[in-house]
Image (cartoon, coloured by chain):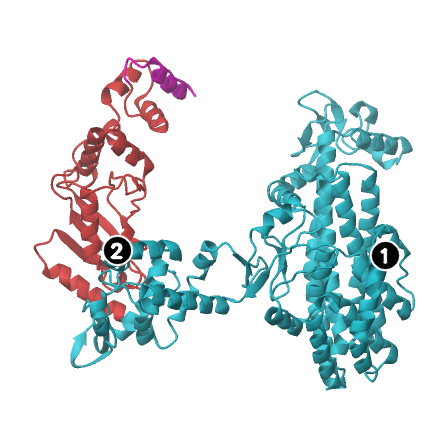
């Protein structure tokens, strides 16, 4: 109970000062670990704001110092006091705004996101010295959007003095382009109505309530049965209610206007509700969502599989500016998926949009072919033609240059002497052979080298992609364990939150690492590249370190390892930030070409 | 259940109507989902006088889903595959509504014969023929009607005429020593119906194809 109260309290604080929420949140948690209880936390909470404001000048002073060096100094395994300090310092000073914001969002759990949505869909950070425009966005579920669409229909209905149901049909006909509809309708309302198949306004009254009970038996044309309940529009084309329902069901999900089976008169939402039951007509709107989203470019589908969240970006015009500055217009959906509003891939930082696009395209086209070439062919040791061996012995003769060589050691054939068709030279494990092989490798054709280089990064990329999925699964399992533990042994809600945060940190870092491999493929080889690679290695190590912690099965063990979790995820977050800031440097130094 | 009653009623309706040039019958008495329909080629078209057989399969969802129709008779028509008999007609696809019947579908096919839609073709080669040389098209379509859709099967099959290929062109290449089958095959591959003697370039292209 205490925990719950506490969490609401921190949320209130966050409401006041979004910027420092990250730091303050962690501060709370660390206090908690130290004391092992909640008694001091009320105080901690109250003092938060003053503590943090006092940190501000300190932050600005340190801005000048080299970011990477700073990182190296960080002692992760140090005491928690130190950690707390470093946490605030680094957290605020090093992370640039977008990152900070990103991180701030990453650590938030669901309830906090709800709060973010309600209070401030505008995630804008102003650190006093410079103002950066980030994207303003808001998540919608399909339900929200249906509500919004129906609201739009009502508004438009007021303007055009039409029923909401009629407006839905009109908009469906005009592919949800309300401007075009208004233009056409104002021009000639009768023609538009006729085209869409709306009953002319004089018949609207007759239009309604056509569910009739017949004493005389009625033979439905569609099923050829005698039925009692029938329905018909003002066109008087009458069918039994079951056939009508069946007819509508088939068409509800097409997103098109449904007309009378026999003529062009369209069924409105009221008709559909009357036939198929109350609330069925909502499906008409649901089926139009896709078209609606396509029509309105400010809406973006979250690209995560089966997510179904639609993110509305209200300052679309800022995207090109962000891209110009090599920043990635990242938005966050309510399910916690980050994605790029420009290219609609998942968050691909540190790779820029251009790099990400090029990489994805390349992987689509090339990876399979290249893999095949590399695994199934060898190069002629003389002319470097790629050769596929499709059967026969190992005595190869290059068709191009007539070089005779051994498939196994790629050495010249005549050296094999009398041991025909069996490379004994390999068995000897002669140093010379190895040397020769090594030399051949160095000699290898440049194109093949570049293919290998690509494949190297592609493999790293895909390995991490797969690992991300596995990690996500694992994290979910662990969280489930802890939730159970929470229920049985009464650990408070907030005490278990470190796991959620660690999991998020891990998944984010893995994503950053993954995309950094795509990025490095396009880097020019300069001295900065070494630094970059070593930072990349550090990040990879940190990722695996945290990932390993998630292997712990026993929930109690997990709770005991809490400090470890916190330390490792903090370290990982720092490495991730180092990676990202290093990317910035890469772009500035021209190691990474901005135009590809 | 409704499907059975409906199909029986439709069969009954067609059989009662002796005026219409349409027939509809079950292939086997115990299977209501497989029928054949026939109709007569409309007058003033190359299909006049022909009797065209359509294979009809009725899906379980009938009449809410359209019947699946294809021609058993070979037809030379832009919207009908000259090989498989597949039909490209909107009412048999998304424009289907349950008030349409098997009879009305067959009537629609009949009117498709009167007004082909070469801009939305099923058989691209036939459509090209239709657009580029309507007279030649009519001739070929008429020939197909005579060969495939009429009862007088005694007429000998002329493969050049079947593909709308000019007889003189074939003779011309035959005089060069190529076999008739090969010439027709090559001309069809190249999509040519006729090669004028004044076009040495096209002629060379055909010879090249023949020598492959």
- Relative placement, left or right, of A26 versus A221 is right
Q: Is residue B69 visible?
A: no
Q: In this view of the protein, which residue sits in the foreground, B170 or A541?
A: A541
In the rendered image, the vertical position of residue A77 relative to residue A428, given as above or below: below
Q: Does the magenta stretch mainly form a helix, a strand or a loop?
A: helix
- Disc 2 crowd, CA 10 A, few/some/many (<14, 14-19, 20+): few
Q: Which chain is disc 1 placed on?
A: A
The residue carrying mark 1 is A61
The CA span between labels 1 and 2 is 67 Å
Q: Secondary structure at mark 1?
A: helix
Q: Quadrant of the C terminus of chain B?
A: top left
Image location (x, y in percent) of residue A50: 81, 72
Q: Is residue B159 visible?
A: yes
- Disc 1 crowd, CA 10 A, few/some/many (<14, 14-19, 20+): few
Label 1 in the same subunit as label 2: yes
Q: Which residues are magenta?
A: B196-212
Q: Which chain is disc 2 placed on?
A: A
The residue carrying mark 2 is A188
Q: Nearer the viewer, mark 1 or mark 2?
A: 1
Q: Is residue B199 magenta?
A: yes
Residue A17 placement: quadrant: bottom right
Residue at horizontal 60%, vertical 63%?
A333
Q: In this view of the protein, which residue sits in the foreground, B211 or B117?
A: B117
Residue at horizontal 80%, vertical 66%?
A549
Of all chains in the rendering, the one displayed in cyan is A
- Relative placement, left or right, of A337 versus A232 is right
Rendered shade, chain B: red
In the rendered image, the vertical position of residue B59 relative to residue A40, given as above or below: above
Q: Secondary structure at mark 2?
A: loop
């Amino acid at each position: 109970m205490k925990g719950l109260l506490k969490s609401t309290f921190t949320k209130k604080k966050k409401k006041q000062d979004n910027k420092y929420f990250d730091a303050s949140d962690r501060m709370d948690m660390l206090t908690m670990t130290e004391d092992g209880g909640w008694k001091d936390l009320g105080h901690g909470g109250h003092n938060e704001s003053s503590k943090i404001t006092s940190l501000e000048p300190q932050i600005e002073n340190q801005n000048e110092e080299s970011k990477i060096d700073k990182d190296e100094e960080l002692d992760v395994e140090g005491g928690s006091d130190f950690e707390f300090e470093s946490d605030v310092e680094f957290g605020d000073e090093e992370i640039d705004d977008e990152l900070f914001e990103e991180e701030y969002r990453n650590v938030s759990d669901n309830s906090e996101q709800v709060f973010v949505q309600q209070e401030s869909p505008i995630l804008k950070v102003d650190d006093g010295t410079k103002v950066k425009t980030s994207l303003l966005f808001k998540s919608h579920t399909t339900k929200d959007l249906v509500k919004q669409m129906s609201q739009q229909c009502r508004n438009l209905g007021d303007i055009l003095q039409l029923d909401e149901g009629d407006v839905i049909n009109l908009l469906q006909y005009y592919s949800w382009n309300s401007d075009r509809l208004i233009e056409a309708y104002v021009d000639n309302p009768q023609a538009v109505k006729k085209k869409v198949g709306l009953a002319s306004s004089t018949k609207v009254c007759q239009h309604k309530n056509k569910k009739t009970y017949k004493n005389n038996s009625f033979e439905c044309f569609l099923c050829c049965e005698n039925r009692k309940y029938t329905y018909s529009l003002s066109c008087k084309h009458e069918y039994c209610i079951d056939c009508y329902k069946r007819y509508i069901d088939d068409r509800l999900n097409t997103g098109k206007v449904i007309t009378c089976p026999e003529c062009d008169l369209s069924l409105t939402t009221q008709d559909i509700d009357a036939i198929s039951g109350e609330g069925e007509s909502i499906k008409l709107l649901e089926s139009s969502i896709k078209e609606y989203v396509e029509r309105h470019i400010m809406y973006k589908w979250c690209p995560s599989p089966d997510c179904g969240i639609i993110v509305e970006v209200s300052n679309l015009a800022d995207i090109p500016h962000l891209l110009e500055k090599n920043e990635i217009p990242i938005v966050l959906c309510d399910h916690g998926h980050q994605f790029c509003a420009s290219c609609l891939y998942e968050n691909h930082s540190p790779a820029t949009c251009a790099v990400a696009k090029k990489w994805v395209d390349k992987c689509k086209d090339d990876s399979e072919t290249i893999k095949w070439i590399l695994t199934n062919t060898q190069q002629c040791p003389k002319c470097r033609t790629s050769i596929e061996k499709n059967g026969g012995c190992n005595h190869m003769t290059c068709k191009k240059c007539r070089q005779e060589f051994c498939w196994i050691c790629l050495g010249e054939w005549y050296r094999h002497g009398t041991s025909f068709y069996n490379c004994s030279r390999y068995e000897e494990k002669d140093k010379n052979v190895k040397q020769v092989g090594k030399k051949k490798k160095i000699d290898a054709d440049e194109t093949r080298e570049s293919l290998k280089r690509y494949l190297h990064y592609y493999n790293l990329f895909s390995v991490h992609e797969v690992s991300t999925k596995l990690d996500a699964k694992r994290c979910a399992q662990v969280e489930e364990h802890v939730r159970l533990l929470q229920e049985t042994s009464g650990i408070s809600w907030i005490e278990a939150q470190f796991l959620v945060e660690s999991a998020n940190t891990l998944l984010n870092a893995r994503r950053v690492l993954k995309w950094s491999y795509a990025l490095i493929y396009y880097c020019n080889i300069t001295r900065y590249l070494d630094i970059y690679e070593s930072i990349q290695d550090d990040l990879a190590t940190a990722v695996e370190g945290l990932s390993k912690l998630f292997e712990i099965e026993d929930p109690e063990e997990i709770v005991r390892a809490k400090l470890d979790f916190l330390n490792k995820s903090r370290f990982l977050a720092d490495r991730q930030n180092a990676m990202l800031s290093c990317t910035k440097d890469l772009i500035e130094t021209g190691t990474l070409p901005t135009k590809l | 259940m409704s499907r059975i009653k409906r199909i029986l009623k439709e069969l009954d309706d067609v059989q009662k109507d002796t005026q219409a040039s349409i027939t509809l019958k079950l292939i086997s008495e115990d299977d209501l989902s497989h029928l054949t329909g026939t109709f007569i080629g409309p007058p003033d078209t190359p299909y006049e006088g022909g009797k065209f057989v359509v294979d009809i399969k009725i899906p379980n969802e009938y009449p809410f889903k359209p019947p699946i129709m294809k021609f058993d008779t070979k037809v030379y028509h832009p919207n009908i595959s000259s090989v498989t008999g597949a039909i490209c007609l909107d009412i048999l696809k998304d424009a289907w509504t349950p008030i349409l019947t098997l009879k009305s579908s067959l009537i629609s096919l009949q009117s498709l014969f009167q007004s082909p839609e070469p801009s939305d073709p099923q058989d691209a080669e036939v459509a090209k023929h239709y657009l580029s040389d309507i007279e030649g098209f009519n001739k070929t379509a008429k020939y197909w009607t005579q060969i495939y859709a009429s009862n007088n099967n005694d007429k000998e099959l002329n493969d050049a005429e079947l593909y709308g290929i000019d007889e003189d062109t074939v003779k011309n290449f035959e005089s060069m020593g190529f076999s008739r089958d090969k010439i027709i095959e090559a001309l069809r591959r190249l999509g040519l119906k006729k090669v004028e003697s004044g076009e040495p370039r096209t002629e060379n292209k055909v010879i090249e194809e023949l020598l492959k």
